[in-house]
Image (cartoon, grey):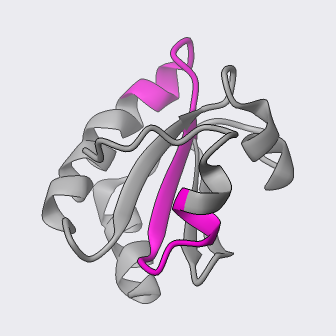
Amino acid sequence: MSDIIFTDNNFEQEVLKSDTPVLVDFWAPWCAPCSIVTPIVEELAKEYEGKIKICKVNVDENPKAAQNFSVMSIPTVILFKAGKPGKTIIGAQSKDNYKKAIEELL
């Protein structure tokens, strides 16, 4: 998983100004479906290392980033390319669904 911690303070720099596509997993520690998505996101980070930046944003600690992209339910995964949000996936999904979205983005 990425060593970069995505917060309200560095979201613009790390996501919106990134030259690399970015997958952002909006989550919270108390969210049961989020705990299903976490190992999938970690596997994808290893599989797509160097091709896409993958990160998690805790919505409790970083509400501004979630509000800016109308995240109303978690988990929500948003894929960004050239600083613009593309596909949004709400709720826990299969690894294949996330991979398909990443492949479409790349």
* Placement of the C terminus among the 4 image quadrants: bottom left
Quadrant in which residue 30 is drawn: top right
Q: Horizontal and vertical percent for residue 12?
A: 67, 58
Find residue 35 and report its horizontal and vertical position in percent.
Answer: 40, 25
In the image, is 100 to the left or to the right of 1?
A: right
Residue 90 location (% of width, % of height) = 63, 51
Give yes or no for residue 6 being in the magenta stretch. Answer: no
The residue at 29%/41% (across/down) is: 3
Q: Quadrant of residue 49?
A: bottom left
Q: Residue at x 56, y 19 (%)?
A: 31
Q: Height in image: 77 above or below 86?
A: above
| Quadrant location, the N terminus | top left
Residue in front for this viewpoint, 69 or 11: 11
- 55 to the left or right of 87: left
> Magenta segment: does it hold 17?
yes
* Total marks in image: 0
Q: Which residues are magenta?
A: 14-35
Q: Position of residue 17 (x, y in %)?
A: 60, 72
Asked whether residue 88 appears in the rendered view, the answer is no
Q: Residue furthest left?
A: 47
Q: Residue at x 63, y 51 (%)?
A: 11
Look at the picture and state if 103 lies above or below 1.
below
